[in-house]
């Protein structure tokens, strides 16, 4: 699957990234995550996609921003996979959907509600958006190692941020609120905009994907999020080498 061609959107080629890639949405968070790697340096920046590559326990690891939502995430993952990446961890912020989740808690996203449009261009809605089990387990282990407060479960992936946070002004207000309450009653933990597309595309490409979110992140909780995500990659490296 790997190609030597420079990828159109991310401006990267084979050899620029490691097989393990952390995926924040916000380009400004790429240097923060990369600061937990050794000898990390910026490789490319184009549109919403900024990439750093460094070393973790001597193994190349990359960080690439996806921008907001499924379409730009799909582009980044498709192009990164073409140049050799095969393990992806979404690292981001989310809105909490359960009262028992505290602001700053981490959420290991084991699966996602497909309430978005990008993945429909890949597979019918009946196909589930499920994370790779090894990635989920390594994310759980990382949370335990760093004593991070965490939960494991389903996220809600949607396309409209304001449809969630300001539903009353939308023409479909009643439907939006009814659907939201359904997800809450079924135990969905958080709401974000990328996991479903990432997980479906990863299954199609035969690669691994998982996600780690922070609920209503503060500066301190964002640092914990980044540390934990990097530690989960360390766990995956050890698993793959065993």
Image: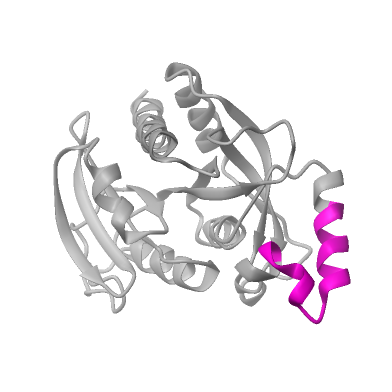
Q: Nearer the viewer, residue 122 or 195?
A: 195
Along the horizontal axis of the image, is 152 left or right of 237? right
Magenta part, dominant SS: helix
Residue 102 drawn in magenta: no
Q: Confirm whether residue 98 shows in the render.
A: yes
Q: Image point 63% across, 31% down: which residue?
A: 151
Q: Residue at x 69, y 70 (%)?
A: 163
Q: Is the image coloured rainbow, by chain, by secondary structure, or in one colour?
A: one colour
* Corner quadrant of residue 40: top left
Residue 81 higher or lower than 39, as above or below: below
Seen in the image, is 41 located left or right of residue 114?
A: left
Q: Is residue 68 above or below residue 41?
A: below
Q: What stretch of residues is rendered in magenta?
A: 164-182
In the displayed orientation, state which residue is furthest to the front: 169
Foreground pick, 242 / 134: 134
Say left or right for 150 vs 9.
Answer: right
Position in image of residue 130 (x %, y %): 65, 49
In the depicted view, which residue is nearer to us: 169 or 239? 169
- For the point 54% across and 27% down, the residue is 140
Left or right: residue 61 versus residue 38 is: right
Give the percent coordinates (x, y) of residue 120. 67, 73
Where does the image place residue 174, in percent across and percent down from the top left?
A: 88, 70
Image location of residue 206, percent across then percent down: 51, 55
Q: Is residue 133 visible?
A: no
Q: Residue at x 40, y 53 (%)?
A: 24
């Amino acid at each position: 699957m790997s190609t030597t061609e420079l990828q159109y959107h991310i401006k990267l080629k084979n050899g620029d990234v490691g097989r393990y890639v952390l995926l924040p949405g916000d380009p400004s968070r790429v240097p923060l995550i990369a600061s937990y790697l050794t000898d990390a340096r910026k490789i490319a920046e184009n549109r919403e996609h900024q990439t750093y590559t460094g070393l973790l326990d001597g193994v190349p690891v990359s960080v690439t921003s996806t921008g907001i939502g499924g379409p730009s995430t799909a582009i980044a993952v498709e192009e990164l996979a073409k140049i050799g990446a095969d393990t992806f961890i979404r690292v981001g912020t989310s809105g909490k959907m359960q009262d028992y989740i505290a602001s700053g808690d981490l959420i290991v996203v084991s699966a996602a509600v497909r309430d978005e449009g990008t993945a429909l261009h890949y597979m019918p809605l009946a196909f589930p958006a499920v994370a790779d089990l090894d990635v989920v387990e390594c994310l759980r282990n990382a949370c335990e190692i760093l004593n991070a407060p965490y939960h494991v479960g389903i996220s809600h992936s949607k396309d409209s941020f304001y449809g969630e946070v300001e539903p009353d002004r939308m023409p479909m207000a009643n439907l939006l609120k009814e659907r939201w309450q359904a997800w809450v009653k079924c135990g969905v933990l958080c709401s974000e905009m990328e996991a479903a597309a990432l997980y479906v595309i990863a299954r199609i490409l035969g690669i691994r994907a998982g996600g780690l979110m922070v609920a209503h992140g503060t500066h301190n909780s964002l640092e914990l999020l980044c540390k934990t995500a990097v530690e989960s990659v360390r766990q995956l490296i050890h698993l793959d080498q065993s």
